[in-house]
Image: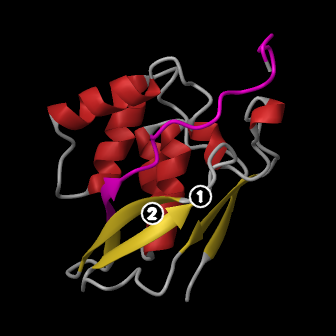
Amino acid sequence: MKNGKFTFEQIPASLAELESIAPQYMSTPQGTAALFVLVLTHYPENPELALSMIDFLMGPKNISNYDRQFYRDRLSGKSYLPNSYFAGATPENNYTPTLPLTVEVTENPYSYDQEGYAKLYIASGGADSPRPLVLRLKPSTGEWFLWEQLLLADIRKPVAGDPWA
């Protein structure tokens, strides 16, 4: 099995920055999965930037209006959710990740059951089990693109600032 731990000094601030670093990551499904976590962090402050970056990571399959609504519904009022996928981010520290940012992507014996697809997992500090996402290989370029993600399910709420915690 091939798991990946990815460390980032910073989050790409623009689509152009993402496009410039993408080639060194998108040659593996793990790398594309890690980039997805990075771009999700833009959503609370700049949804359009995040969606343009997600669209890039989806490759030939463009982001749909349904996808746009799904991200809006799932991330509304949950600015902490994207950070929960970085190492060190827990409900107790208000999902503040340790620096540099680290994303660990894992697989299991069934991750490559369907040719050209990879079902990988990323742990959230606020969930009991890792969440899946599916990536698809574009054989003509050797790049892996985001096909499906299930990272936006609810997680435990941050404890910091919660008078009922």
Left or right side of 114 for 75 = right
The residue under the point 55% across, 46% down is: 38
Residue 45, placed above or below residue 120: above
The residue under the point 57% across, 35% down is: 81
Q: Is residue 5 magenta?
A: no
Q: Is residue 160 magenta?
A: yes
**How far from the left and from the top, in percent, is residue 44?**
51, 23
Task: Measure the alpha-carbon separation of dots 1 and 2.
Answer: 20 Å
- Does residue 25 appear anywhere in the picture? no
Q: Which residues are magenta?
A: 145-164
Residue 124, placed above or below residue 130: above
Q: Name the image quarter holding residue 50.
A: top left
**How far from the left and from the top, in percent, is residue 137?**
28, 75
- Does residue 15 appear anywhere in the picture? yes
Q: Which residue is mark 1?
A: 129
Q: Amino acid at mark 2?
A: Thr
The residue under the point 32% across, 63% down is: 145
Residue at the outermost top position: 163
Kindly report which numbered mark, 1 or 2, lies closer to the viewer in this rendering: 1
Q: How many numbered marks does the figure carry?
A: 2
**How far from the left and from the top, in percent, is residue 29?**
43, 72
Q: Which residue is mark 2?
A: 32
Of marks 1 and 2, which one's residue comes earlier in the chain? 2
Between 59 and 86, which is closer to the camera in this rendering?
86
Mark 2 surroundings: few (<14), some (14-19) or many (≥20) residues within 10 A: many
Query: SS for tag 1?
Result: loop
Left or right side of 139 for 45 = right
Query: SS for tag 2?
Result: helix
- What type of secondary structure mainly makes up the magenta span? loop
The residue under the point 61% across, 57% down is: 123
Residue 39, placed above or below residue 112: above
